[in-house]
Image (cartoon, grey):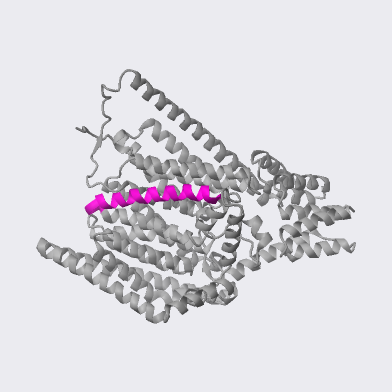
Amino acid sequence: MLRLAPRSTATIAAVQWPALLTLAVGVLLATQEGGFHGDAWYPAALFLLALLALTLTVAPPTREHRTRPLTRTLIALAAFGLWTLSSALWADVPAAAWDGANRAVLYGIVLALVTLRRWPVTEYLAALAIVAGGICAIAIVVLAEGALRAEPAALFVGGRLSAPVGYANATASLWLIGLWPALTLACERRLHWAARSFALGGACLLLETSLLSVSRGAVASVAVSAVLLVAVTDARWKVACAIAAVGGAMTLAAGPLLAVSGAATSDELDRALASALAAIAWTSGLVVCVGAVALILGRRAALATAPDARLAWRVRADRTIALLGAVVVVLVLVAIGNPAQWASASWHDFKTSGYTAVEGGAGRLTGSLGSGRYDFYRVAVDEFLERPLTGIGYENFQVPYLVHRRTDEAPRYPHSLAFGILSQLGLVGSALFVAFLGQALAIVRRALASAREQRLPVAGALCGFTVWFAHGLVDWLWEFPALGILAFSLLGLAMRGCEASSAAELPCEQPRRRWLEGPRANRVVVRTRAVRGLAVIAALAAAASFATLGIAARLTHASIDGAARDPALALARLEQASRLDVLNAAPLVTHGIIARRLGRSQVAKRSFREALDREPRNWFASLELGMLSADTGRRDAALALLARAERLNPRQKLIGEARRRVRRGQAVDPATIEQALFEDQRERIRRVAP
């Protein structure tokens, strides 16, 4: 029989705090542009790796906490990360594949930290509170900054809230990841009614703040998550009422919120933002008050109701929810008319209209489905058919897209996790990811089935992951480590389930059984030592990879920021970065640009040539080297390099213009070309976010 022993304070810290710290790291990283840049997320990855190693050394999980399905899930995710790293061998941009593999390893570390042990209900709710409370705090700070800042337009791109992540759709996903833990806490009967009412107000705050980003993908993902939460929890009526309260408040505030993205000038945006912030404040406060009254009255009614009557009421509530769901479906069908015609028209709109048909304000959510995604997905499918087994290399979408695109967009990622994995990692990578996800969801299903009265917290954690994953199927959210850390942490919570006990006790290590003696015991010892040795090697390799690329990223960004003040120091930093990140051409390209501006043409040429050695299909390095060759009188070499750049990026008109000028013997100013490219990029961003 399993023996139980009291937990000391040190044991509690060793068992629970590593996972809670992981959640806190995700929340803090969200304030650093979602951790998108390497100099932000690599230090966090190193910290989490060290935290995992320390936890496994000081307080490794016992046999009671280890399960074969969980082990298989972690092995599948590790194999997926190894395959992404292997794709650097055949990728056009091997540095991008290496960086992407590190991100996949980071998510594996997060999942391992959160699933080391089972979660008692008290610590489980604390974990959900960290996610919900931390993200609510970020939202309050961002909104306060918008109210107090002299130029709040800096927080927006095209009228859509992009702070703190820097990308409007990813910002909307951040708020929605925190929405479901907040709603779960609001429905959790173990908490005090005051805490529950404030959690409901926080959920309202997050949902309304997400509307400021006017993300179409976010709307679809939150609808999917809402249906899932109602379906898998046993507190359906309670959850449905909470969702209805938050959704009703958002409907009241929708006009002022959507008016922000429709503002045409900076002054209009300031006025619209002031109205939107006032709407968020009074509706969130209203939800807190209404929630408090409802919880107090509901508690009294529950105490005065017999158990049999409560059971009958629950059955009637489930039937009412099903009826309301059917009514919603009928209303949607009436609104869209003939479903076949609506689907055909929507598909045609998605394929052909592009961003030109997308409106601002409410029209963005209810109008055209146009974007560049159809063309992104078309190229992704073509690349998969070209190399179905291995794919083109992880995070290597931009190179083939520039060649085959039919739009003026130049995305680094295909704006879809599914199309990205399929085209970049082929059937092998897709099979590994599906194996991981299928095994993880099977574990979650068993956790929900066994949770009983603790099913609601598990369902809330699952919905936090689902809203990120569903949105990521039509966007590039995977590349924001802060969102990934939070999402995988919530997935780990859902996989581990929630135990009914208060966890005042912890299973002790079972004594070794007598049959584990002799030759069999020796084989077990050898196998254990081999596994530990491989784990140590893998940890050291991951640490070296994180540290190397993290330092290189920091040196590169520091050199860009300080190039105007001290160009010599910037060049020295870029040389160090190129020696550390041996596959990356970016430090060399930046080094060449700075050297050329200093008049050191030979140094610049050498940098661009080395960049092309690392990435032969780098069109920008070919353009820069071609313009330098023309400036030094090597006309034939310049024309060849410019023709190569044009083949790699045929829709970039500036390359063709530079090539024509060289052919006519006219001078080409690289600084003018670079400025024009920068303005072109800003114009594309403005068009994409109307």
> Residue 348 or 531: which is nearer the viewer?
348
Q: Confirm whether residue 142 shows in the render.
A: yes
> Residue 166 or 140: which is nearer the viewer?
166
Residue 180 x %, y %: 35, 60
Residue 160 x %, y %: 52, 69
Q: Main secondary structure of the magenta part?
A: helix
Residue at 43%, 45% (x, y): give it: 110
Exactly how many numbered labels are in the figure? 0
Residue 68 x %, y %: 35, 39
Residue 580 x %, y %: 64, 39
Relative vertical location of residue 344 with respect to residue 230 in this rendering, above or below: below
Which contiguous range is marked in magenta? 425-454
Which quarter of the figure has residue 15?
A: top left
Is residue 447 located in the magenta-colored stretch of the structure?
Answer: yes
Q: Confirm whether residue 566 shows in the render.
A: no
Residue at 31%, 56% (x, y): give it: 459
Query: In the figure, is residue 289 to the left or right of 24?
Result: left
Relative vertical location of residue 460 with respect to residue 143 in this rendering, above or below: above
